[in-house]
């Protein structure tokens, strides 16, 4: 069963069409990587899925329900949560407070504070720290924790490893691997590291100038084909 189905999505920035008829679906419990060069439309796509950018046409179906006209907060309540690039946190609040507030805005379900901390062990030692003083890796763990507190059935992760140290990235992906194994949460990720994107995901979608240039099972696509699609080479 598909957790998310996207059909012929079009999204614009003024006169510029950033997403040009993108279609894909993701099965429950699977991971889809969205890759593409700078400006390919990845962030715009994510923002239209989460509801912070409106669509011009097309459909977004979460568990068969058309959510494409719902405001962002209602999509979160229905189970679609996003970890945005840049991970905005309430910097004056502690990590625990950041997580608890997020929990008030999502669905009800099994993701409570203890379970989130177990899934993201980096959070345990910093629960009572003020978020403003955290390292990049710690802030990212909090941002993912906040999204999990909303009990998402589909989790959108935009550039989770951007600007993090290699050790922080490793730690983060260990947690995400566990999340993937549990099959509880469907994930759609944007990851700049192409090799990591291929390894971590079940399916890959490559965007080029707002269109799907290539899609398929990550273990069946050749590296050469992905690179060609990525750069728009013949
Ligand atoms: P990056 O990897 O650099 O974040 P991306 O694949 O996420 O790129 P988008 O940020 O979605 O791509 O950008 C797609 C297109 O839309 C680009 O041509 C970009 O210049 C344009 N664009 C993005 N945001 C805006 C905006 N706020 N106003 C006008 N044009 C925009």
Image: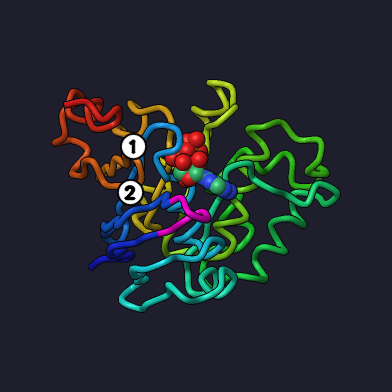
Q: CA distance from mark 1 to mark 2?
A: 8 Å
Q: How is the image coloured?
A: rainbow
Q: Nearer the viewer, residue 111 or 190?
A: 190
Q: Position of residue 197 (x, y in %)?
A: 35, 34
Q: Residue at x 50, y 76 (%)?
A: 70
Tell me where the magenta segment starts and ends, as one range. Answer: 11-16
Q: Residue at x 64, y 66 (%)?
A: 103
Q: Is residue 67 left or right of residue 77?
A: left
From the viewer's perspective, is residue 167 above or below residue 100? above
Element at label 2 = strand
Q: Earlier in the sequence, mark 1 or mark 2?
A: 2
Looking at the image, the residue that sits furthest to the bottom is 65
From the viewer's perspective, is residue 16 above or below residue 63? above
**Residue 175 visible in the snapshot:** no
Q: Quadrant of the N terminus?
A: bottom left
Q: Nearer the viewer, residue 180 or 62?
A: 62
Q: Residue at x 37, y 57 (%)?
A: 186
**To which residue does mark 1 refer?**
200
């Amino acid at each position: 069963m598909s957790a998310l189905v996207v059909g012929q999505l079009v999204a614009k920035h003024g006169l510029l069409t950033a997403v040009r008829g993108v279609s894909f679906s993701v099965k429950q419990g699977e991971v889809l990587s969205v890759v593409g060069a700078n400006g390919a439309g990845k962030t715009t796509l994510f923002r239209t899925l989460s509801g912070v950018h409106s669509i011009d046409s097309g459909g977004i179906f979460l568990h068969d329900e058309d959510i494409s006209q719902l405001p962002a907060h209602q999509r979160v309540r229905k189970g679609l949560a996003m970890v945005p690039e840049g991970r905005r946190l309430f910097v004056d609040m502690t990590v625990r407070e950041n997580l608890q507030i997020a929990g008030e805005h999502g669905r009800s379900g099994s993701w409570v504070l203890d379970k989130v901390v177990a899934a993201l062990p980096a959070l345990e030692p910093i629960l009572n720290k003020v978020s403003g003083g955290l390292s990049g890796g710690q802030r990212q763990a909090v941002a993912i924790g906040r999204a999990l507190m909303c009990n998402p059935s589909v989790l959108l992760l935009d550039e989770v490893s951007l600007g993090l140290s290699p050790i922080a990235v490793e730690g983060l992906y260990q947690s995400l691997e566990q999340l993937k194994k549990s099959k509880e949460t469907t994930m759609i990720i944007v990851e700049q590291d192409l090799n990591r994107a291929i390894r971590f995901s079940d399916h890959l979608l490559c965007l080029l100038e707002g269109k799907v240039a290539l899609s398929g099972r990550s273990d069946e696509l050749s590296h050469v084909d992905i690179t060609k699609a990525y750069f728009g080479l013949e």
